[in-house]
Each structure stands twice: as C-alpha cells, then as structure tokens.
C-alpha cells in the first residue's frame, strides 16, 4: 500500500482515513449494544476507544489491512467504518469488516461503500480473495454479504466462546473477477 492514504469516493460517500476527531463517533458506534452485538470488540469509554483508533493506524503501518471512515459527501458527516484486516499479500487475501451508526442502517450505505473497497482490494492491492466471518445467527449480516455476492463456503461450529456460550461462524468469500 502506498504511503499516501487512498481516499475513495462513491456517488454519496467519501471514504477517508480516520482522524482524531472521529474518536467520539467510533465510541458511539462501538459502545452501542445493537452495533457491537456481533462485532467482536466494544468500548465503555472514549479513552478505551483510543485502542480502536490505534488498531486502524497499525493496520496501515504494518500493511496488514486498511480501514476507512465512511462519511457523507454532502456534509462530511461520519456514517460508519469499513475495511480490510488480516491482509496477507502472500496469499492475496483479507477479511472484510464493516459497521454503521444505527441511524444509517437500511439506506444501502454498506453496499455502495463496499463496492469501492472491493475495487481497491482487487485492483490496487491485488487481492484474489476477500473473506467474511459472520456469526451464524447474525441474519442481517448474512443477508448483506449475500447482496454483495459473497458465496457461503461453510460453517465453523462452536468456533468461539462469547458470553460463556459457544458461537458458530459462517464463512463467506468473494473473489477477484
């Protein structure tokens, strides 16, 4: 990945690098019980959320991923975040991640933003495969990845323990054309 952060645009959105002033919005998203239900990390303070901001920065620095802040083109308003992590250039693959602030759910934002992220992943980074690991009972997310033309490859049963119970994951993949 080049040293200058790649800003991506769609008809309605600009996908840009995270900045310090995004901290409150990242906290708002990653402390919301409905958003973090399936997300894997959550934060209970602005101070703790700095860990996530550092994670975004480290992905870029270590070249093992890249995440964008998804913002309205019209007024710059922060909508959510999306990107690639666990990127391995040797195997030409990465894992996809995405979340939106609740007021932005159901507006086609993910589909529009992800299309430019996929384009960047396949055509600029040169990835061949993008994976999505979705908790088996996360019906909304499974529907969303199918809309993005991911293919279900299988289910990892009782893959992790979450809140004292085993959780299964469905593995989805999308490939370069």
Image (spheres, helix red, strand yellow):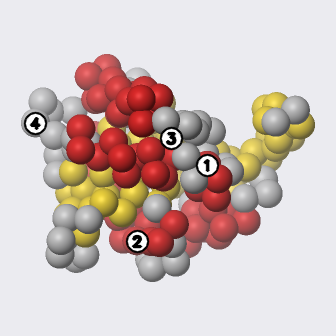
In this figure, which residue is indicated by the disc labeled 4? 4
Marks 2 and 3, how far apart at CA: 19 Å
In the rendered image, which quarter contains the C terminus?
bottom left
Mark 1 touches mark 4? (CB < 8 Å):
no
Tell me which label, 1 or 2, sits earlier in the chain: 1
Marks 1 and 4, how far apart at CA: 30 Å
In this figure, which residue is indicated by the disc labeled 3? 95
* Residue at image location 30% in from the left, 51% down from the top: 69
Q: Nearer the viewer, residue 21 or 109?
A: 21
Tag nearer the camera, 1 or 3: 1
Q: In the image, is residue 105 above or below residue 50?
A: below
Marks 1 and 3, how far apart at CA: 18 Å
* Residue at image location 35% in from the left, 33% down from the top: 53
Is any part of residue 15 visible from this angle? yes
In this figure, which residue is indicated by the disc labeled 1? 36
Q: Nearer the viewer, residue 172 or 168?
A: 168
Mark 1 touches mark 3? (CB < 8 Å):
no
Determine whether the residue tagged by mark 2 lies in a helix, strand or loop: helix
Q: Residue 109 bears which disc, if any?
A: 2
Tell me which label, 1 or 4, sits earlier in the chain: 4
Q: How many marks?
A: 4
Coordinates of residue 161 in the picture (x, y in percent): 82, 31
- Left or right: residue 147 versus residue 81 is right
- Left or right: residue 158 versus residue 75 is right
């Amino acid at each position: 990945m080049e040293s200058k952060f790649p800003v991506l645009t769609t008809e309605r959105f600009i996908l840009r690098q995270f900045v310090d002033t995004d901290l409150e919005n990242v906290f708002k998203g990653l402390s919301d019980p409905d958003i973090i239900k399936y997300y894997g990390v959550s934060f209970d303070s602005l101070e703790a959320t700095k860990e996530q901001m550092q994670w975004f920065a480290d992905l870029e620095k270590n070249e093992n991923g890249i995440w964008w802040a998804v913002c309205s083109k019209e007024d710059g308003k922060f909508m959510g975040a999306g990107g690639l992590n666990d990127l391995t250039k040797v195997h030409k693959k990465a894992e996809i991640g995405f979340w939106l602030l609740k007021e932005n759910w159901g507006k086609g934002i993910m589909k529009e933003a992800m299309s430019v992220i996929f384009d960047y992943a396949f055509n600029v980074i040169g990835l061949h495969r993008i994976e999505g690991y979705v908790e088996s009972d996360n019906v909304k997310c499974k529907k969303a990845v199918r809309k993005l033309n991911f293919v279900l490859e299988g289910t990892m049963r009782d893959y992790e323990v979450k809140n004292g119970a085993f959780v299964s994951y469905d593995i989805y993949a999308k490939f370069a054309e």
